[in-house]
Amino acid sequence: MNILLVNAPHLSIGSRLAKEHLPPLGLLSIGGPLIDAGYDVELFDADYYNYKIPQVVDEVLKRKPDVVMLGHSGSTSAQPIINEITKLIREENPDIRIILGGVFPTYHWKEILELNPQIDYIICGEGEQTALNLILALENEINPRTLKGLAFRISGVPAKTLPAEIIKNLDEVRIGWELMNGYNYTYWGKHKAVVIQFSRGCPYPCTYCGQSLFWRKWRHRSPQSLADEFEMLHKKYGVVVFNFADENPASDASAWKAFLEALIAKKMNIILVGSIRADNIVRDAEILHLYKKAGFERFLLGIENYSEEVLKNIKKSGTISKDREAIQLLRKHNILSMATYVVGFGEERTKDFYNSLRQLLTYDPDQIQLLYVTPHKWTPYFKDAEDKEIILTDQRKWDYKHQVLAIKHLKPWQVILYVKLIEVIMQTRPKALKRLCFHKEKRIRKAMFWYSNIGKRVWVWELIQFFFVTKLSKDKMKLKEFWK
């Protein structure tokens, strides 16, 4: 059986303007067990080529697969594109089985199956074992009703089986890295790069995030096993940059320290970037030299908001003082900090944007990224926002970089101008420019120039898109009505 894994093209501006791409870890993870079971598996990364939908369909048909499996890391915004691709595939070749997976399909399986008769199966939740079980069942003509973790139609009606068991030992699930052959995946300034995970899930209850819900339980790789995998990727594939997909890899302090020490023992000249909670940086103040020695060059810190009340409402479980201390500690060890700040959790007024800027200036991060709250239906935050009006009904742009929810006291054009003003002030303030030009580490200077050059292009592009391309909804529609 020939299986084609398809990474759908996306509208993400980051991947387009940087002209750099990271491999689709989710599809590679699905591919590993299928390859080991003896199946002929190929990756077609349409996002890498930025193909238009007709090109994607042509390429899929040309490769003559028996099964097409589709997914995308930005699964909410990618879903409409996947719907179009699969409809055209089915029209041209009704014999190809079409299987879908990812976060959005896991929670929206019913409506996807109702509206898209061309999609045969949806893998709900963690997919490695479920995908293999499904392929084995199809090959041996076993009724899929006996399998867990699936959604499909029974007599034309969407149905879902019981949830699959979580993968307890992540080291037993091999990632199909060999599927990257033929793609020059790079990041961080044209360095060969991969996305990788130390852990899955998150033990924190932030209401706007679905990590803890999707993965169900926080688990981590064996520190030594993952360090060995880093070494293999570095030596065999020439990988230099490792981008952690974890929301917070350092949740288990002892396991995380063991991983850093195992990686340091390999003595590799590599670059690590990722996300982490500020309070874990503060917790690890005494071992941050290990972070640096292992290769970390930047951490993304979710600051989210200046208001303690808002942070409490979204159950961020962080504090302003620890956010500020974490940035200072990272700077002391020559590790860059990127502060992400989310617009739309409250009904902001002009003064709130002013207060946000003041707080960010006191934090003094090396880099800044402003995002918009995106109310996914499966998160607890959805209930808080379901009666709010949405201004953007194009799901393809629900990617955190477009305003989705209306803000009662401000027009959308005011919001984007405030956002862009904060970004330009933060990135051109004297302290930031001084570090950009005169940081004592050449590698760090190079990384900051890389990010700054991309940032300037994105900044202009987003303004042009907003004022001349993006069509905001003129009809007043509540969030809960949109997802009906």
Image (spheres, rainbow, N blue to C red):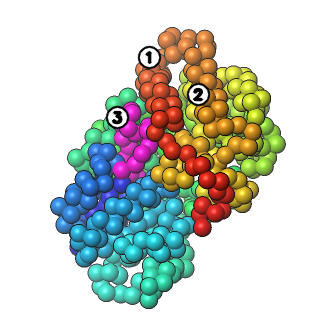
Side of 348 relative to 108 (left or right):
right
Q: Nearer the viewer, residue 259 or 323?
A: 323
Could you tell me if the residues under marks 1 and 3 are in contact, i.e. CB atoms within 8 Å? no
Residue at 52% from the left image edge and 71% from the top image edge? 111
Q: Position of residue 116 (x, y in %)?
A: 42, 71
Q: Residue furthest front?
A: 474
Residue at 36% from the left image edge and 54% from the top image edge? 8
Q: Nearer the viewer, residue 54 or 427?
A: 54
Q: Say which residue label 3 marks.
A: 19
Distance CA(mark 2)–CA(mark 1): 29 Å
Viewer-nearest of discs 1 and 3: 3
How many numbered discs, if any?
3
Side of 118 relative to 363 (left or right):
left
* Image disc number at residue 442: 1
Q: Position of residue 135 (x, y in %)?
A: 33, 75
Give the residues in magenta: 9-26
Could you tell me if the residues under marks 2 and 3 are in contact, i.e. CB atoms within 8 Å? no
Q: Amino acid at mark 3?
A: Lys
Q: Is residue 10 magenta?
A: yes
Q: Position of residue 340 (x, y in %)?
A: 61, 36
Distance CA(mark 1)–CA(mark 3): 23 Å
Q: Amino acid at mark 1?
A: Lys
Earlier along the polypeptide chain: callout 1 or callout 3? 3
- Residue 382 quadrant: bottom right
Viewer-nearest of discs 2 and 1: 2
Earlier along the polypeptide chain: callout 2 or callout 3? 3
